[in-house]
Amino acid sequence: MKPSRNWIVVLAVVAALIGIRAFSGQGMGRVFVKAEPITVQVAADARMGTPAQSVSWTRWSAVPAKAYFAAERANPQQTEIQFSWARTMGLWLAAFLTLAIFSFMYRDNPAYRFAEAAIVGVSAAYWMTIGFWDTIVPKLLGSVWPNFVKANILPSLAEQSTVQVVAMWAALVLGIMLLMRLSSKGAWISMWPLAFIIGVTAGLKIVSHVESDLLQQSVATFKPLLALERGADGAVAMAPTVWLSLRNVLIVVGVLSCLTYFFFSVEHKGLVGRSARVGVWYLMITFGAAFGFTVMGRVALLAARVEFLFDDWLWLIDPSGKRVVETLSMVVG
């Protein structure tokens, strides 16, 4: 379906406003960096045969725009703070992807599909890279070929114990067996490492869930109904004591009433029925609070992206004082 003429007009107006904003006032959407020379003394390594040496490099750190403007006013020929093309392009790309995702509020479109595919692909590649350098290289390859990894890839590799080396060899064998899933004839071999992974994961999760969901929550339920809060002089503080005691009473009553609601061996009448109804209220309040927390989390994400567009990209607001504050009238003028 072709976009309507109204939407074409809206997009044209938005593009014109962005163009005007880019060439008015202080402009928009630029990132400045400052050179920071760094020197590190590297100790000698007798095992690798390298002498002590000094390593130097320059790190470019992002600085507020007002620092660049102040430096330019003080010395127009200064080179300490410079405009960064790479980071500016990243800023505009982030703004485009943000607007592309927001465009789904109108309808599905090629810009949204491109942004969605890019985010999913980049996320998958990022986590694959993190897994390779944080898991495969130091743990697997560092145990199987420690000398080669330490000499060519990871000089800071720590010595591996015998148990770790044996475990990593076993993991390598299981990983190779798992890749047999790609073979039509040897696919059955991959069932053995898969069964091992599922069994070990289930065993670990059962223990962790028993400790966190059962034991810890049971311990947290056994609270004194009268909680005394004492000050530095040993005297009982009445206000904290009242609130702590009320909190503990509400926790104990809530746990017992919720358990009663899910106890179906007794008909919910009389005292049991009233307790079950109290449990329903506790459950509804809990679900409502959880839903509200989720909604507020999404609203916070939306507010962060809107602030990014208006602050870092358009330079229409300046809540953290990173630039000289401009009013909308100055922008229009």
Image: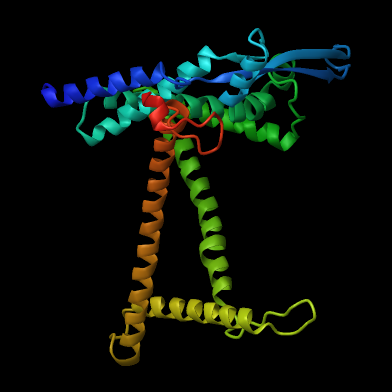
Viewed as shown, does residue 10 lie left or right of 84? left
- The quarter of the image holding the N terminus is top left
Q: How many numbered badges does the structure rendering display?
A: 0
Going 57% across and 62% down the picture, which residue do you hit?
A: 211
Viewed as shown, does residue 216 lie left or right of 177? right
- Of residues 139 and 88, the one nearer the viewer is 88
- Residue 317, position as x, y percentages in the image: 45, 34
- Residue 260, position as x, y percentages in the image: 38, 80
Q: Quadrant of residue 105?
A: top left
Q: Quadrant of residue 267?
A: bottom left
- Residue 190 shows up from this direction: yes
Q: Quadrant of residue 266?
A: bottom left
Going 53% across and 46% down the picture, which residue do you hit?
A: 200
- The quarter of the image holding the C terminus is top left
Going 29% across and 85% down the picture, which residue do you hit?
A: 268
- Of residues 164 and 18, the one nearer the viewer is 18
- Residue 181 shows up from this direction: no
- Residue 295, position as x, y percentages in the image: 36, 52
- Of residues 305 and 171, the one nearer the viewer is 305
- Of residues 138 and 57, the one nearer the viewer is 57
- Residue 217, position as x, y percentages in the image: 53, 68
